[in-house]
Image (cartoon, rainbow, N blue to C red):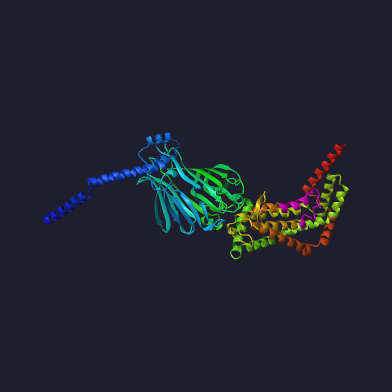
Amino acid sequence: MEEKKLDINSIIGFALIFGILIFWFYQTQPTPEEIEAQKAEQARIEAAAEEKKEESPEEPLETQSLNLQDSAAVAQYQNSIGNFAFTKANEGTTVLENEVLYLEIGNKGGKITEARMKNFVNHDSIPVYLVKDQNVSFGLVFSTQDNRVLNTEELYFEPSLSENNGNKVLSMKAKISANQFLEYRYEMKPEEYLVDFTIRSQGLSGVINGREPISLHWDQKSLRHDKSVQYENRYTRLTYQHEDGKISKLSESSDDEETEQQVTWLSYRQHFFSSILATRTPFETAELSSKNLVEEESKDVKFTKEYKSKIPLQIQGGELAYSMHWYYGPTDIEVLKEYKDLGIADSIPYGWGIFGWINRYIFTPFYGFLSSFLPFGIAIVVMTILVRIAMSPVTYKSYLSQSKMKVLKPEITEINEKYKDNAMKRQQDTMKLYNKAGVSPMSGCIPAVLQLPIFYALFMFFPTSFALRQKSFLWAEDLSSYDTVLQLPFMIPFYGDHVSLFPILASVAIFFYMMMTTGQNMQTQPGMPNMKFIMYLSPLLMLFFFNNYASGLSLYYFVSNLITIAIMLVIKRFILDEAKIHAQVQEQKKKPKKENRFQKKMRQMMEQAEEQKKIGKR
């Protein structure tokens, strides 16, 4: 085999390369004059930096991350610095956005510093922000092995933006070294308000003190979006879900705090929009608080409530790994039901018990169907007509009871005159007459009780239905808020600084309805001397209360009472025959009537009371 030797050409080539490197090295060395100039420039830069620091001093990163309060503590901390420090980045932000949601994530703290809805504006036509102007504080607080306390809000994170199967991924890392870091990872999908959020650490088992819990702190002041801050604040609330599916809430009107266990999501609701933190691994505990920031109706109010949550996070093997989800978006069932596996649709305030069930599973989908092909105001009118028709059998029973009471009015008047000085005897004979005629004074109340679930469900539906938000009808600009036909230059207590027309129409309609129902019977029922007063008071209360309420609800009650009046007129003129009812009552009186257990008990109690009264007079 031929032996390879280094030929002369190779030697000459290496010599030339080496010579060129030596020549380049000496040519690039600065001259003594250039060295002096560099020293002068460096001195100038340091002097300028020192002057800037005196004007706006900036703490070292390690001091910032501890939130130390006095110079003695700072000096003590600086003397105890170990062999690690998180890297310091700039104060910039990174944008993460899709077709519906715009987020800005700050390098300092790695948290969301701005969250804007792209498709919605508030009552002043300004884009809806859930996070803006430092209204949110979010970070982890944990202890180090040398018993220091770090707050990630003061750490600087390095951003790295990438894509994963069409999703935008932002990794924010607070680094000790290339392989040691704390990471916030955000993943945003196209056209979704839900953002996957992961917190994890790597290589920090020698830094994090496993003996002390890591606590997540999420504080937020809810920004105002509606024209009436008190009305909006009524539906602004901290809501949360337990692992068993139970929904709990903090007070909507006063300061409140709770410590809960096994929490799967937290909702900082701001009426029609929500900031939600959800997890598939329940938080073992959560310290929650809500503070009411609204004292009175004012155009200058910027925030409605202040929410705070403190959540301990568990670490395993000295490292942290927790997968969660951020939701910044509308409190709309059509959007939230897309995340059924998280259960966040239950954050919508449908109401409790059967009322909430009716609202969620009947009125919400029914109105959604009607408004899909009808104008929103007309859809309310149509829904009202159909609801009243469905309730017409109840109306019929109520009016039938009133007609029977009307037939007995002469006999009741006679009893009242006969025993006008003996209330007990008057009541006994009245009850005997009712029993003999087969008439129950309670039968007129039962239909009203049956309508209560409908009343309350609609009472919650109109102010909270996202489908009605900023939808106009006639003079009302927003069916989810009050209408204004006259702006007052002063504030009327309990009424407001404006005049709404729909509540006036609804109050007039309910007055005539009560005239038809209560008016004809107010003197026939013993023990009800204030019925006339109630007949006038109810419309007045509605006028004041509904003046600041959703105009859609006032529209519903106005149309509902008109339809009810029409149904009762039809029943009176074409269905019920008072002469026939009178004959039926008289025939019923001739039949022997057996007392039921309740009637017998009531009669015995009255007789005993009457006997005691006689004994007392002796």
The region drawn magenta spans 515-540
Q: Position of residue 44 (x, y in %)?
A: 33, 44
Q: Quadrant of the C terminus?
A: top right
Q: Position of residue 410 (x, y in %)?
A: 86, 54
> Can residue 197 be seen here?
yes
Splitting the image into 4 quarters, where does residue 500 fall?
A: bottom right
Is residue 521 within the magenta segment? yes
Q: Position of residue 579 (x, y in %)?
A: 83, 61
Splitting the image into 4 quarters, where does residue 162 fall?
A: bottom left
Q: Position of residue 386 (x, y in %)?
A: 67, 62
Q: Which sits in the foreground, 178 or 282? A: 178
Is residue 580 within the magenta segment? no
Q: How many marks?
A: 0
Q: Quadrant of the N terminus?
A: bottom left
Eyeballing the image, is 116 above or below 254? below
Q: Is residue 292 left or right of residue 71?
A: right
Identify which residue is drawn at 55% across, 53% down. 273
